[in-house]
Amino acid sequence: MIFNQKAFKLTTIFAILIVIITFYSCKFVIKEEISEVNLVDKKASKSVLKLHHKLTEITKKGVAIGHQDATSYGIGWNYENDTSLIKSDINEVVGDFPAVYGFDIGHLELANEANLDAVNFNSMRKLIINAYKNGGIITISWHLDNPTSGGDSWDKTPAVKDVITGGIHKEKYDLWVSRVADFLKTLNYNGEEIPIIFRPYHEMNGGWFWWGEGNCTALEYKQLWQETVVLLRDKHNIHNLLYAYSPNKLNPDDDYLKYYPGDEFVDILGIDIYDFNNANAYKNSVINDLNIVKKIASEKNKLYAFTETGLEKIQTPKWFTEVLYPAIENSGISYILFWRNARLDHHYMPFKGHVSETDFKQFIQLPKTLLLKDLKTNKNK
Ligand code: BMA
């Protein structure tokens, strides 16, 4: 009896030791992985390091599925009309929320109450906090107005030269960035700064934005990016950002790195590619371009993602399972962001009763697609 008691005690101590050792070695591995990461912000908050680690882990499982303005509005509803309930068209269709949430802060620079798509900034803050609380990943783009002409992002009046050092609107731009910083500072949950993938000045190799090809030089673009980072990080002490660079689909002569502001200024390499009702061209672009992004990102030891995509109205049968999925399943991207469900003639995700509803349901059953619940569990199909 005495012997048995002793043996029992020893076994218990041994078991506790094993648990402690396992716990600390796991912690150590995570710490090791995190400390090897070379981020734009050397003072990045712990939550940013955790997000980076989370994205790295996601790539081992699959692709996190994201939707722009997922919870702000959808077809036939708007969060503003009933703030007691957080909805999402994806959730209506498949019973789960997106893993990634896209928001846009265009018009925050003007100190407006709502963004360029009429999303109120106070509501946006609530939705960001809620998504983070539930384990979601947040990414923010910035379709800011043209600082020179006062037009919108699509006003091509050259302006980049005016907002970089020495430019006539530099002061105005500093004020605009300070407004962005003020908003970012309010994104907290439970004492943690909410980590954000910040993706300004995207699709610069296309000619449709004032910061795009033909409307500024690559050198000016890089300077704009770098000075924006320095303002946010060093002047305003914003430490909850991962910075994402995302050119548009590459044309045959395009160099992915033409506007790249440098390894010290970018954390995530991305690309935006849309299907303009040409499935073959889209598939080829996605496979080709994601391969290029993967190669460059791997050399640079950086994460990479499919930062914007979609087929407007998704009328092509089996688009998700037969066009998109084969092109991304082995791409190694950490996430994919579908554009917004604004209207019946401008949406990129199915909603209840949509012709692509069944196909989307099948898409999210496939091994690599991860919605919110799949981030927490092992997707076992
Ligand atoms: C574009 C369109 C616009 C919108 C803008 C910013 O692709 O969806 O209607 O204003 O993005 O969200």
Image (tube, helix red, strand yellow):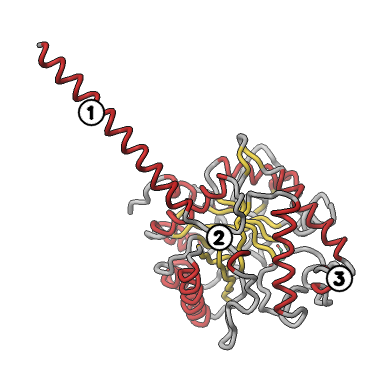
User: Where the N terminus falls, by quadrant?
Assistant: top left
Q: How many marks?
A: 3
Residue at 23 percent across and 28 percent down: it is 14
Ligand 1 quadrant in view: bottom right
Q: Is 110 above or below relative to 306?
A: above
The residue lying at 42 percent from left, 47 percent from top is 30
> Can residue 44 be seen at all in this image of the molecule?
yes
From the image, tell me which residue sits under label 3.
167
- Badge 1 marks a residue whose secondary structure is helix
- Residue 176 location, x and y as percent? 82, 57
Mark positioned earlier in the residue sequence (1 or 3): 1
Percent coordinates x, y for residue 318 in the rendering: 46, 69
Residues at circles 1 and 3 in contact by the CB criterion of under 8 Å: no
Task: Report whether 178 appears left or right of 89.
Answer: right
Residue 69 lies, in percent from the top left, at 65, 55
Work out whether 50 lies above or below 156. above
Residue 351 figure quarter? bottom right
- Rendering quarter of residue 345: bottom right
Residue 318 visible in the picture: no
Mark closer to the observer (1, 2): 1
Decide which of tag 2 and tag 3 comes sooner along the chain: 3
Amino acid found under the numbered disc labelled 2: Pro
Residue 14, labelled with which disc? 1
CA–CA distance between discs 1 and 2? 54 Å
Residues 325 and 239: in front is: 239
Badge 1: residue crowd in 10 Å (few <14, some 14–19, many ≥20) = few
Q: Bin the neighbour count of mark 3 within 10 Å (Cα to Cα): few under 14, some 14-19, many 20 and up.
A: few
Q: Residues within 10 Å of mark 2 (few under 14, many from 20)?
A: many
**Tag on residue 78?**
none
Q: Earlier in the sequence, mark 1 or mark 2?
A: 1
The residue that label 2 is drawn on is 350
